[in-house]
Amino acid sequence: MNSAEYANLARVEEQHWYYSGKREFVRRWILRARPPQREDTLLDCGAGTGRFAHEMTAHCRVMVLDDHDEAIQLLRTRFNDDQILRLAGDRIPLPDRALEFVTALDVLEHVPDDKAVVSGFARLLKPGGLAVVTVPASMALWSDWDEVLHHYRRYDRAGLSALFPRSDWELVYVNYTNVAVYPLVWFVRKWRGRFPQKKTNQARAEDRVPGRLVNRVLRSVLVTMAFWRVPFPFGVSLVLVARRR
């Protein structure tokens, strides 16, 4: 992401229903699937502003990984230098089986070789360790928003699941999220796509917090449905929880 996008995220992520709701359901999935101990270590990959990782310090030890200078500057306001990692080539500079938890919240879509990244997660996690990832879903929703954020792809359930082979992983949960707003998001992005000349003058809904009541309702729906066992056929996002064999 460019500097403006980091600034947008830092400005709205504390209260915006999607960003705050995503942090909540990922945290709750971790607490449900493998309750962390104080001595456990979680690595948040593509940590961005570091807000999610900072919230997880209440439960375990935390390290953060990012490779963008803007993110590193933000992370230094929340973490010590020995908690902040950058890639060493294409490798995370930690030994094998060093971690109990790995999280990657809206990260895999930013990397050319997502399969290699997930293989890195498998290397880093101890047996029984947990990986939790979120990604944008449905190429039908591809828009200028994806282009600005330098996405390589959006995912479907089968494609995301295939990155976590059964030989290495037990899939605890894989499902679409942000289901309720899918029709509206589809309509808005298709509408914007019809008028590309106006894109630079249009404020994106992702960059502003809705009114308090709407924001609260959307957040509650997002979090609640992120635990349903109903196999949703579509959604704006996907969440995957996997345990290392």
Image (tube, rainbow, N blue to C red):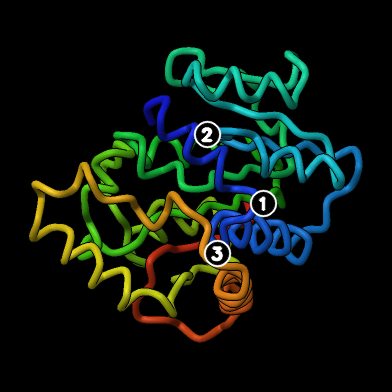
Q: Is residue 101 above or below residue 112?
A: below
Q: Is residue 80 above or below residue 37?
A: above
Q: Which amino acid, mark 3?
A: Leu
Residue 210 at x, y percent in the picture:
51, 64
Whole-number angstrom distance, CA of label 2 to CA of label 1: 17 Å
Dot 1 crowding, Cα within 10 Å, few <14, some 14–19, many 20+: many
Whole-number angstrom distance, CA of label 3 to CA of label 1: 10 Å
Residue 152 at x, y percent in the picture:
26, 41
Q: Which amino acid, mark 2?
A: Gly
Element under disc 2: loop
Whole-number angstrom distance, CA of label 2 to CA of label 3: 22 Å
Which image quarter is the N terminus in?
Answer: top left
Tell me, for residue 213, which label it has, or none: none
Element under disc 1: strand
Q: Is residue 204 left or right of residue 88?
A: left
Q: Which amino acid, mark 1?
A: Leu
Dot 3 crowding, Cα within 10 Å, few <14, some 14–19, many 20+: some
Identity of the residue drawn at 44% across and 36% down: 117
Residue designated by label 2: 46
Tell me, for residue 130, which label it has, or none: 1
Residue 125 at x, y percent in the picture:
66, 40
User: First in sequence: mark 2 or mark 3?
Assistant: 2
Residue designated by label 3: 171
Which of the two marks, 2 or 1, is nearer to us in this view?
A: 2
Identity of the residue drawn at 42% across and 54% down: 206
Which of the two marks, 2 or 3, is nearer to us in this view?
A: 2
Element under disc 3: strand
Q: Is residue 197 above or below residue 81?
A: below
